Each structure stands twice: as C-alpha cells, then as structure tokens.
Image (cartoon, rainbow, N blue to C red):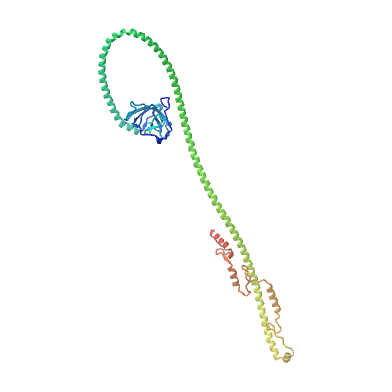
C-alpha cells in the first residue's frame, strides 16, 4: 500500500502505554475528496527525537495495534534532529494508496520501535456535500484570492529581479561571445571527446531500452495486481452482502424460535389448566355419583318408611275395629247383666240357688259367663306380639311405644334428615358433606 518495499516497524503495545501528545497533527480536514492526493501536516514537539524508521500511517478508527495500518509513508527527518523547538513537517499520500470507502480514518505517527507518538482527529474519504461546498466557496475563496495576490506580487518582484538578471546576463553573454572565439580552438579536442560520449550514449540508450522493457513488464504486473485487488474487493463486498443476508435470516429465525417457545409455554399453561379442570370435573363427578348413590339410598329408606307407615295404618285400622267391636260386646254384656239381675229378683228359686251353688266370680271384664271374645283378644295380642314393632326408627334403631302419636314418630325420623330447600331432596345428617356438595351443584346451574 506504500511506495516502498520495506514494511514499517510495528508492535502489539497496548494503547494505554502510548504517548499521543508528542506529535500534533495540524489542519486535518473533516473529509478528503476521493481520487486526490492528501497532504498530512504535523508538528514534532521537543518531547520526541525523530529517527530514520519513523513513519506516518493511516488507520481505520477502532484499530487496536499498529499492525492494523491501511497505508503508510516514511517520516522525513528534519534538518536539526536534536532541536529544542517544535518542527513543522508534512507528508503527501498518493491517491492510489488511499482508502476508497467512507469509513472514518486518522493519521498516526509511529516511531521505529512501533510505538504511537501522536494521532489526529478522525476524517473521511468522501465527496463534498452542498453545505461543505458552500463553506469552501465563501471562506476558502477569499483566502485563495489573498494567496493569489501574494503570489502575483511575489512573481512581480521575481520578474523585476529576472529582468535585471537578464540584463546582466546579456552583458555576460557579450563577454562570453568573446570567449567563444577562444573556445573554438578547443572544439577539436571536444569533438574527440564527443565521439567517446556518443559511444557511451549508445550504450546508455541500450540500457535505457532494456530498462523500459523491464518497466513495461513491471507495469503489466502492476496492472494484473490491480485487477486482482479489484476482484478481491468485489468478492469481499459480495461475501459481506451474503453475510449480512445470513445474519438477517438468523435474526428472523431467532425471533421465530422465541415466538414458538412462547406458544409452547402458553400451550403448556393451557394444558395444565385443562388438566386441573379435568381433575376438578372428575372429583365433582365422583361427588355427584356419591350424592346420587346417597340419594338412591335415601329414596330406598323413604320407601321403606312409607311401607312401614302403610303397615302401621293398616294395623291401626284393625285395632280400631277390634276396639269398636269390643266396646259393642261390653255394651251387650252390661245389658245381659242388668237383665239377669232383674230376673233374679223375681225368681222363687233365687235364694235356694244361691245357697246350693255359689255363683262363680265374674271374670275379667265384669261378665258373669266370661268374655266370649277374650280368647280372640288373647290370640290377637299374641299375633301382635309376634309382629315386629313398627315404632322402630330406621335411622337410629330407637323403639317407641305403640301409643305414641304418628306426628311425633315422623318428627323424630325427620330430625335425622336434611332437606334441600331447592328440590326438597332429603339426605342423612351423617352425610352432611354430600348435602353441601348437592347445594353447591345447584349454585353451578
């Protein structure tokens, strides 16, 4: 990238160990127009001693070591190397070796040990914008006119001095003309020398021809190298484009993967919620089945209670009929006793009868000849004793006397049950949880 074949001395020294203030770059433009030479102006301070292998390089902003230079030029040595004052220097970079992109670059002064001694502000290689052209047109034109005036004044002075010099030369030429006559004498000797020089000139021409051919070969090689550089540059741009496309595609894929992960997470949450709902429905179904089973048991118990009520009512009706019939028999027995006592009062054999044979004592019920239905009643009582008691609670197995009121018995049985206020369905108090689940199911409807 530079005009010399030697590589500049570099190092891997960290930037923290460099001294950027020993060389100061002056008049650094914000940008330089591509295709033109660039002149770098810098000042060597008294803190640096220039050496023969010092160089000035152009670095892309963001460089880490001095090996990352884009191009460089050897720094010229000042007249007084050990001067105690600052020295102004300049270097011109040819347009061919300058960067072709619009990235930011900066000048850096590197000594022969590869250490950075100074760095400029960043700049770009790009075309002028309208605003930049306006600034150059308004401010630079005035400076240019002043510079032209100075140059014209200087040229005027130089022309005056040249005119005086020409006049003096004319005088000198006249004197030389006189001397020419003297020189003609030595012309012959010069001719012989001329022949010798012509021979040498021919030899030099041949050497010059050979050097031109070699130069043509070098130019062809240089042209080939330029084409290779252009091809490499185009390949690099194409690869950068493909890399950018691949990175964009990778970003899209990563965003899609994130979206898929979010969808999978949402689906897992939904699946978890569905699973919980399913478990809840299973538990509710199990409770409903238990409730239905309990309801069926309650219905069976109620049917059994209704059957016992019906049997109780039948037996109670039979008992009432037996009591009515017994009452009629007692009335008939009382009538017969009254009739018998009246007959004894008027019979002449009453005293004899009483003396001869004692009258048997009346049996139970006050009947003289006994109760003809006593055996039947006894048999009825025995039959009733053989029938299981219908006054037994189906819930707690408590036995009640037969003379208890039906309403009291039903109230006792009802005290063991819980009745739904919505559908009038009954449940045992021991299954209070089933009753509460049943009420909760009504709340879900």
Q: Is residue 265 visible?
A: yes
Q: Is residue 428 at least partly visible in the picture?
A: no
Towards the viewer: 124 or 432: 124
Where, quadrant-wise, is the C terminus in this rendering? bottom right
Residue 410 pos. (x, y %): 60, 70
Image coords of residue 76 (percent x, y) = 36, 26
Q: How many marks?
A: 0
Residue at 26% across, 18% down = 165
Which residue lies at the image location 70% right of the left edge and 79% below the top edge?
374
Q: Position of residue 153 (x, y in %)?
A: 26, 24
User: Image quadrant for the N terminus?
Assistant: top left
Side (left or right) of 194 relative to 246 = left
At x 57%, y 55%, the residue is 281
Does 159 sit left or right of 351 as displayed? left
Q: Foreground residue, 268 or 334?
A: 268
Instruction: Pinpoint residue 231: horizontal percent, then vertical percent.
Output: 47, 27
Farthest right residue in view: 356
Residue 117 quadrant:
top left
Residue 95, quarter of the rendered image? top left
Residue 103 position (above or below residue 325): above
């Amino acid at each position: 990238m530079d005009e010399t074949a030697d590589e500049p001395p570099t190092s891997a020294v960290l930037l923290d160990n460099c001294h950027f203030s020993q060389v100061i770059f002056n008049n650094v433009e914000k940008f330089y127009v591509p295709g033109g030479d660039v002149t770098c102006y810098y000042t060597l301070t008294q803190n640096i001693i220039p050496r023969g292998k010092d160089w000035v390089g152009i670095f892309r902003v963001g460089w880490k070591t001095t090996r990352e230079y884009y191009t460089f030029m050897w720094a010229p040595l000042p007249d007084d190397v050990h001067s105690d004052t600052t020295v102004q220097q300049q270097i011109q970079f040819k347009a061919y070796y300058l960067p072709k992109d619009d990235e930011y670059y900066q000048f850096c002064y590197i000594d022969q040990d590869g250490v950075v001694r100074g760095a400029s502000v960043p700049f770009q290689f790009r075309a002028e914008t309208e605003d930049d052209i306006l600034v150059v047109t308004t401010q630079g034109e005035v400076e240019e006119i002043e510079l032209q005036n100075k140059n014209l004044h200087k040229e005027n002075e130089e022309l005056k001095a040249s005119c005086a010099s020409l006049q003096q030369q004319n005088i000198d030429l006249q004197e030389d003309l006189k001397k020419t006559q003297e020189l003609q004498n030595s012309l012959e000797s010069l001719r012989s020398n001329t022949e010798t020089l012509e021979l040498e000139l021919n030899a030099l021409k041949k050497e010059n021809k050979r050097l031109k051919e070699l130069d043509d070969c070098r130019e062809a090689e240089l042209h080939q190298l330029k084409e290779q550089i252009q091809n490499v540059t185009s390949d690099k741009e194409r690869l950068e484009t493909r890399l950018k496309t691949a990175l964009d595609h990778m970003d899209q894929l990563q965003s899609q993967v994130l979206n898929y992960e979010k969808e999978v997470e949402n689906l897992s949450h939904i699946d978890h919620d569905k699973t919980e709902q399913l478990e809840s429905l299973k538990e509710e179904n199990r409770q409903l089945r238990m409730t239905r089973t309990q309801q069926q048991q309650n219905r069976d118990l109620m049917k059994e209670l209704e059957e016992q009520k019906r049997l109780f009512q039948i037996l109670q009706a039979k008992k009432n009929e037996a009591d009515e019939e017994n009452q009629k028999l007692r009335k008939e027995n009382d009538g017969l006793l009254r009739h018998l006592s009246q007959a004894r009062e008027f019979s002449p054999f009453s005293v004899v009868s009483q003396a001869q044979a004692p009258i048997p004592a009346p049996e139970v019920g006050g009947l003289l000849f006994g109760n003809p239905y006593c055996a039947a009643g006894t048999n009825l009582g025995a039959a009733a004793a053989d029938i299981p008691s219908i006054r037994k609670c189906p819930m707690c197995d408590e036995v009640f006397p037969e003379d208890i009121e039906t309403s009291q018995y039903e109230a006792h049985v009802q005290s063991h049950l819980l009745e739904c206020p919505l559908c009038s369905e009954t449940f045992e108090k021991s299954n209070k949880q089933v009753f509460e689940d049943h009420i909760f199911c009504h709340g879900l409807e």
